Image: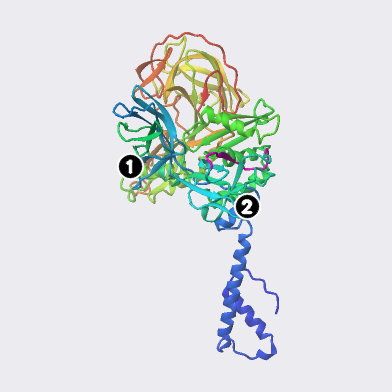
Amino acid sequence: MPLANFTNLDFNQVKTTLKEYLKENSNFTDYDFEGSNLSSILDVLAYNTYITSYNANMVANEVFIDSATLRENVVSLARNIGYLPKSRKAATGIITFFVDTSNVSPSPSSLTLKKGPVATSQGGFGNSSFVFSILEDITVPVNDGIAEFNNIAIYEGNLLTANFTYSARNPNAKLLLDNIGIDTELLSVTVKPNQASSRSVRYTRQDSLFEVSPDSTVYYLQEADDERYELIFGDGLFGKKLEDNNYITADYITSNGDSANGVGQFSFSGRLVYSRNNQEYVVTSGISLITTGLSARGGEEIEGVESIKKFAPRIYASQNRALTANDYESLIPTQIYPETESISVFGGEELVPPQYGKVFISIKPRFGDFIPNLIKENIKKKLKKYSVAGIVPELLDLKYLYVEVASKIYYNTNLAPSATFVSGVVQNNVNMYAESTELNKYGARLKYSKLLKLIDDSHNSITSNITTIAIRRDLRLTLDTFVEYQIGFGNQFHIKSMSGYNIKSSGFTVAGIQEVVYVSDIPDTNRRTGVLFFFTLPTPGSQTPTIVRRNVGFINYQSGVITINPVNMTGAKLKDGQPILELSAIPHSNDVIGLQDLYLQLDTSSSLFEPVVDDVSSGLDPSSSTYIVSSSYSNGKLVRSGGPETATVTVGSGSRVTAQTSGVTGGTRISTSGASTGSTGSTGSSGGTTSGGGSGY
């Protein structure tokens, strides 16, 4: 039988190959394969070959982590290279309540909130009810008849307990936790000499064999079938070995993952007790309503197959050490800070000027914009056992690079009910694009052509669009102090005019100048650098600026860095209670990138989507004599526009005034007098940072 090259698992191809083989046999020279009973036999043989080949192909696929599809096989292959997939994670909330014990008899000196269920979600939340538990008993004193339970961390899910008795006669027995949905970060394991003993030792989870001695009270964890977990203890060499009749207790929470995220109203369902004269009493009255300090957040589903395929080989390649940027980007989300949504890592040698011996890490958490300082310190502490000696990790705050869109959308009035409808459809699609994973990550790139196509494809009435792009960063200010500011955009600026006014700013006030001022630029003849100046306007839309102070800073158009010399700003626009200066420019390329620690955001709230009637396509003006032409360049205004008619502006020593802005965001006409005190800040790096107390968001 000749060797057949099968291009795919095709039944007809297999049957044809079998017929060709039989035709070459002299016993079947004149045989009618189509009209005989032998055709049915060939069907059976071809079908059997097809099924066998299919099974062989699927088995071969499941042998390799890249092609495996079943979770059990992917997990098993990842285990071979030392990777434990992330478990389901329980949503965490913070609550506070108090107990009035004035009517409790006998009077307690302290109250204990027993571990286990503490609260339930109040009312319907997504047509579901959730239980929240604590892992350990919490005891507080009673002062003046009041016991206060402040800032208690509660975890969504039920607290369960599994017990095992180790038998030396069956050392290979598996210690399986039979429930699915376990949050392994909340797993607590204790071991007693025997079941009757009152002495127990808490064991800690270990992920590697480093720093483990024969007496280390550690356990290892691995995922078994059906998303269950198996406990593994030491063998006397790597960790303490269990002895006969040791009694093992595992306390864990089984959660619903991200389903409980957002729960903010709770009802008390816990158990409060106290002891007097060796007798335990239960308290059921005097319990206040629960105050929510932090709504439930942080719940996640178990790590998916695609994520395991992505991170397992990278963790193996890093060999549990942080040397390259890729090592940090793999280790931090999987081993150190699982709440990482996106991460950017770059070496100090990439900065201008370079900072050798440092690696800079910027993390976007899943919830919120910034990582608390305490968590930063914990991350740096955990990184020490992975990082190479002499390399200092530095964690940077998240810095946003906003992209603003101005789009004129031409549409056919015969195919759309109204201009509002067209604008709404486009804005909804752009919002979905802005919230997609394509943009919400470090190293993201706004693809201009894709944005244009998305607008055109939003509705069949849209005939074309003229869309311009601007990039913006918000510079956080330190008022009433001389500070030097530097902020980087990570993208080259476009020089529209050698006469200046290529960058725009919101309004602010400066000590010694009574009017609201703005900052802009004049390019040098080399078209690479330029100088900054302050100017005023008689009216917001005026084209007759008055320069009030020159050489207040400089700009590098190629690197996209703006530096403002030491200046005492006394007032500015407020954002989240923080005075800021909005700076925007036209990028040299409409494909905007988030460089290094810049997190790209398509700011639809500051974007404009203006529908324009296409007279030609609508049949209103076939000759195009009244066709509205839209400029392909940005508007000619000298300052940033928009905003309410009045705005609260912080001035002098944190006081506030309300002033007319006349449509210019952050621009006011006020008189301030602030002390010009303080020291000059040092210049920050060009990677989008500021100095002297200011920083960019």
Q: Amino acid at mark 2?
A: Ala
Residue 444 seen in the figure = yes
Residue 355, image x, y percentages: 67, 26
Q: Quadrant of the rendered structure where residue 483 is?
A: top right
Other-residue count near label 2 (Cα within 10 Å), few / some / many at <14 / 14–19 / ≥20: few
Tell me the magenta residue range: 197-211
Q: Which residue is mark 1?
A: 420
Residue 281, image x, y percentages: 36, 35
Q: Is residue 32 magenta?
A: no
Farthest left residue in view:
103
Q: Quadrant of the rendered structure where residue 201 is?
A: top right
Residue 226, image x, y percentages: 52, 56
Point 37% across, 25% down: residue: 663
**Residue 415 higher or lower than 686, as above or below:** below
Badge 2 marks a residue whose secondary structure is loop
Which of the labelled discs sits on residue 683, or is there none?
Answer: none
Q: Which of labels 2 and 1 is toward the front?
A: 2
What colour scheme does the image use?
Answer: rainbow
